[in-house]
Amino acid sequence: MSSRTVSTAAGDGTAAFRDDTAASARFNWPTDVVVDAKGDLYIADSRNSRVRKLSGDRVSTAAGPPTDVGDAAGYVDGPAALARFDYPCGMAIDAKGDLYIADYTNHRIRKLSEGYVSTVAGSGTPGFKDGPAASARFNWPRDVAVDAEGNVYVADSANHRVRMISPTGDVSTAAGPLADVADASGCVDGAAASARFNSPYGVAVDADRTVYVADFLNHRVRTISAQRQVSTPAGPPAEDGTLRGCVDGPGPSARFDGPFGIAVDRDGNVYVADFYNNRVRMVSRAQVFTVAGPPAGKDSARGWVDGPAASARFNYPKGVAPDGKGRLYVADCENNRVRMVSGSATARFLVVPEGDDDARCAFANTEFLPRLKVVALDEESGPVPYVEVTFTVHGTSIATAAFPNNRSSCTALTDPDGIATAEALTAGPVPTDRGLKVEASAPDKASFVFHLSVKQK
């Protein structure tokens, strides 16, 4: 098994500016990271007012002054080396490879394309105003995301809204009040125009145009569907008020403490930089897990520790980016480093959890079977978290043996203890005793077979 580990991808930890090898380079509050199609990494180096690039083992300046000029903050469009930003935050890359940047203190959205920086939207005056890009107003935009059609979504943090810039340059409000109200903050699900956020800091969008929002002061992960409905898939229901903490488990039971950056991979897994918890969390199949940092409920002390994911320490992580190859990059802000979570969790074999042998006993027809459970194990390192286990009904003459919605199989993700739990299985009715076989399988051919019997009541 190759278990998840955390390492330092770039930065020596000193808050400064220096282009160099990855190990010797210096950042000053890296706030976000994104990966392009070539595998190069872009870093929003906020206090250096630059966009940096990690390619191979070398860190360079992609936009902003390439030399140490002291205070590089400003607002200038033009060739990348002459451009100026003021605290660039979140970033996103579109299908053409153009880089969009939330220029936080300039209250603008910028773009780096083929070595040239331009302004996509924002007049530079803080406020709230929809309309043509040049006259639109943002108020401390924190992050951006781009969908397949070229729409740019903006986490407009101090306006407590998610805004959208169309490919034609029109700015509109994707979620939150459409009118300029005195205080748009709150926590309300429902129709987008009626929804409320409280300092949305991060946005991401998947292939289905579902927008994910890191709702920082509401301590929740929110979504905006393509039909413009807002919901809360992770964190307490909106009506439950502000509940912060560090709890893994089913979405409504999970707790965050300042979700900052957010990203979604091609499999639909959502990654969250959980700022005050100093952890990287994941939302997958309606469950929340801790991917890196101490297990939920343990001490969340800040620090800088590389090694096994559960032993790693971060210092206010702000941004996350999966690279599509099993690696996850983290903008570890106050460690002034870019970290990398790598290694795939794979199981050598599956077994029934201790004390769950009754799961192999007979069950009466038409009744729900106690949930089948298996533990994913590696012979050297023990339980393996966060691997997919598929439960499949095999070789039975009982036509009605199925998981919910008449499915012959279901998939579950192992929890931090390596346990995968199947959905409820039903079988019957049958005229006589019949046998039933359910196979649990994980990648790399790890498997376990339940031999069950269905008896007439």
Image: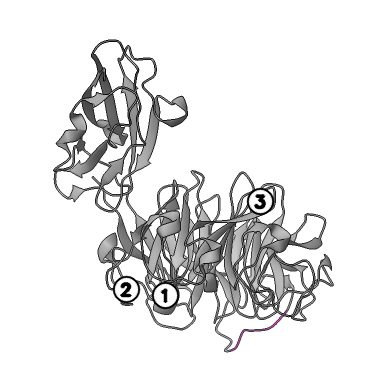
Amino acid type assigned to the residue bearing label 1 in the image: Tyr
Please, what secondary structure does the residue beneath circle 2 have?
loop
Q: Is residue 33 visible?
A: no
Q: Pick the quarter of the image with the N terminus.
A: top left
Tell me if label 1 and label 2 are in contact, CB under 8 Å. Answer: yes
Where 366 falls versus 110 (above or below)? above
Residue drawn at (55%, 63%) of the image? 238
Identify the residue position indicated by label 1 in the image. 276
Please, what secondary structure does the residue beneath circle 1 have?
loop
Rounded to the nearest angstrom, the CA distance separating label 1 from label 2 is: 8 Å
Where 453 falls versus 241 (above or below)? above
Amino acid type assigned to the residue bearing label 3 in the image: Asp
How far from the left and from the top, in percent, is residue 282? Answer: 42, 56
Residue drawn at (70%, 65%) of the image? 176
Q: Is residue 32 left or right of residue 209?
A: left
* Front-lying residue, 402 or 165: 402
- The dot on residue 300 is 2
Tell me if label 2 and label 3 are in contact, CB under 8 Å. Answer: no
Where 250 falls versus 371 (above or below)? below
Q: Give the image quarter of residue 49.
A: bottom right
Identify the residue position indicated by label 3 in the image. 147
